Amino acid sequence: MIVSSFIPKQGICSLVVESPDDLWILRRLIGPGDTIVTKSSRVSKKEDEYSRPDRGERIKVTIALVVESVSLDSSVGRLRVRGRISESSDDSVSTAGSHSVSVSPGYGLTLRKSDWTPLDTTILNSAKASRTFLVVTMDRREAGIGTLSGSHLSITATIDSGASGKGGQEVDQEPYLRKIVGVLANTWRSGDLIVVAGPGHTKLALANRIAAHPEMGKSYIVLEGFDLSGADGVRNLVKFEGFKKVASDSVLVEVQEIVEQVIKRITQGDTKVAYTLARVRQAAMAGAVESCVVSDDVFTQDIDEQELVDTLNKVEQLGGRVYLCDSSLETGKQVSSFGGMVATLRYSFKPY
């Protein structure tokens, strides 16, 4: 999340959403009675004698929306905020009735709260920008390119070199490598790290071209000992020990370590662990939660969204840490199998 302006005494924060993790942060920050200022579009209907009543011109406006409800649809990476328009940059836009906006990565808004609490600041700070990793797993025939931001991994592109099997005719690799560099250059931003892995020596040829790039040249690393390529390679690389060492400060690696600790404690009969919303909530209310991981498909577990938000806020209010986990990855699937959320506890806690 990019925070361009933050004035807690006035309860004002301007920001840009960067990842699905940020949507969870906003879901916990925005509540009924708050105001969001953002750009939207509305249909302005003409009321002259010859205009059709079902037609109107869609115009872009800046609005201030007093929030009435907010809900998260993590399956499509969208936060929906509904409320009443209190201000508009266009006089033709009516302030009567309700309006809704859909917030997704890349969306910017300003949040106004009448009472910005220390917990709100803690939640906002938990969205601090972390390094993004551009992952390339390749061999001479195919390459998978992914983006790891926070705890979420997305497949950016898959590229086929056109090369045949071992007995086939060799093809010029230059267009193949040039395509990969092009995708990376369009995605890369200052501070990102490119990680290249895969069987064979083609990855070294790619590394040479990245090194020659005027901007990305010093922001890459080559990992040896990894033998997969393509999109499957990207998904498996995040579990590779060599990658974990490189990305030791990433949110995903932290999440993996917490989930591994949860499973270990359960296997050993250690009671300093909780899972499912009901049990984690009880532990959170008692201040026992040290860290909590939530799968982004948790709502498929038929739980109350507001109860979940209140539980996560209570965890951080009492000094615990909250993490979101990508349900498409193995770690996320493990969390999903435990009811969508797991927690390590500071001490053994017996549910009521």
Image: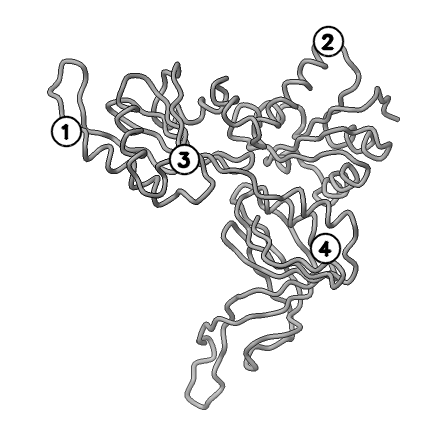
N-term mark: 2 or 1: 1
Mark 3 in CB contact with mark 4 (< 8 angstroms): no
SS for callout 3: loop
The kind of residue on which mark 3 rests is Ser
> Can you name the residue that lies furthest to the bottom here?
49
Question: Looking at the rendered structure, which numbered label has been put on residue 268?
Answer: 2
Q: How far apart are marks 1 and 4 (CA)?
A: 57 Å
Q: Name the residue that disc number 3 marks.
A: 219
Between 294 and 84, the residue placed more toward the observer is 294
N-term mark: 2 or 3: 3
Q: Name the residue that disc number 4 marks.
A: 31
Residue drawn where x is 72% and y is 29% of the image: 291
SS for callout 2: helix
Q: Name the residue that disc number 1 marks.
A: 172
Q: Quick check: 54 above or below 316?
A: below
N-term mark: 2 or 4: 4
Q: Quick check: 122 above or below 93?
A: above
Q: Distance between the residues labelled 3 and 1?
A: 26 Å
N-term mark: 1 or 4: 4
Left or right, 83 with respect to 240, comes to right
Display colour scheme: one colour
